Amino acid sequence: MGRIQLHDIRKSFGAIDVLKGIDLTIDEGELVVFVGPSGCGKSTLLRMIAGLDKPTAGRIEIDGTDVTPRSAADRGLAMVFQSYALYPHMTVRANMAFGLQNTRMPKAEIDTRIAEAAKMLEIEPLLERRPGQLSGGQRQRVAIGRAIVRRPTAFLLDEPLSNLDAELRVSMRAELSALHDRLGATMIHVTHDQVEAMTMADRIVVLRAGQVEQVDTPLNLFNRPANLFVAGFIGAPG
Ligand code: ADP
Ligand code: MG
């Protein structure tokens, strides 16, 4: 579960074509990183996949089913944002439970899932605190925990580390990769940071001005960049 296929995804805002026809297959369990300069359409593309916005044209399939007409709630994916988007007045536990409460899931199951995720992310001592009492890194862990408890088919992470200081960002890269291995779920991780992409990805999708420039493993991108843009962006000798 968790194969995501994009067929000629296009998105325009008024006269501006932000996504110009994206074709891409993300395999089950893959950790794919979307990388590209600010404004190239990474967040827009992720929002289309999540179902938070509709493409102007094109089709999105999850595990062979056309989900293009479906709302975000009916796609079984979980999105994690750069800004955490935690509810400030709720405890960490309540934040993590929030997305499960209207699913008729028994409270015992909700508690079990929260305990599991908290253990995995090492945030057990923080469960009764509120977001205001947490550091940036702890908040981002909670935001990831909130996604994990939903057991989504895929995780969509939009620059989840970019609000963290440099040292924490580096250690969180490794943590996210380890978490991916452990969960075995499909992950799409968006970043504008080349090093982050190179260190985390199974495959990298290089985007530029709403188009895919190249899709390949970090090693192949480095050794065989398709063009000067990719070479320059990845930092390889072109
Ligand atoms: P990235 O995440 O790669 O930095 P975005 O996907 O956020 O880029 O934005 C791509 C382009 O689309 C930008 O030029 C941005 O201004 C434009 N854009 C994004 N969302 C909207 C919107 N709701 N209305 C108009 N323009 C938008
Ligand atoms: Mg963005």
Image (cartoon, rainbow, N blue to C red):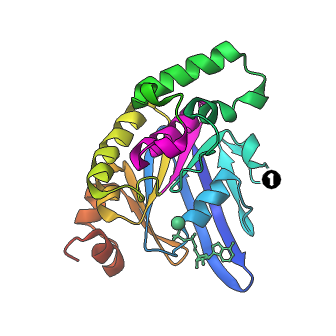
Quadrant of residue 17 within the rendered picture: bottom right
Outermost residue toward the bottom? 15
Instruction: Report the number of discs.
Output: 1
Outermost residue toward the top? 108
- Answer with left or right where residue 214 lies relative to residue 40: left
x 64%, y 30%: residue: 97
Residue 204 falls inside the magenta stretch: no
Q: Amino acid at mark 1?
A: Pro
In this rendered view, identify the residue nearer to me: 87 or 215. 87
Quadrant of residue 196 within the rendered picture: bottom left
Q: Which residue in the protein does label 1 denote? A: 69
- In this rendering, the answer to whether 15 lies above or below 42 is below
**Crowd around label 1: few <14 · some 14–19 · many ≥20 (10 Å):** few
- In this rendering, the answer to whether 113 lies above or below 177 is above
Q: Quadrant of the N terminus?
A: top right
One can see residue 28 in this view: no
x 62%, y 36%: residue: 95
Outermost residue toward the left? 237
Q: Quadrant of the C terminus?
A: bottom left
- Which of the four quarters of the rendered structure image does ligand 1 lie in? bottom right
Q: Position of residue 9 (x, y in %)?
A: 65, 65
One can see residue 173 in this view: yes
- In this rendering, the answer to whether 76 lies above or below 67 is above
Q: Position of residue 76 (x, y in %)?
A: 67, 38
Magenta segment range? 130-158
- Answer with left or right where residue 12 lies relative to residue 5: right
Q: Position of residue 190 (x, y in %)?
A: 47, 58
- In this rendering, the answer to whether 37 lies above or below 8 is below
- Answer with left or right where residue 161 lies relative to residue 234: right
Q: Position of residue 60 (x, y in %)?
A: 68, 54
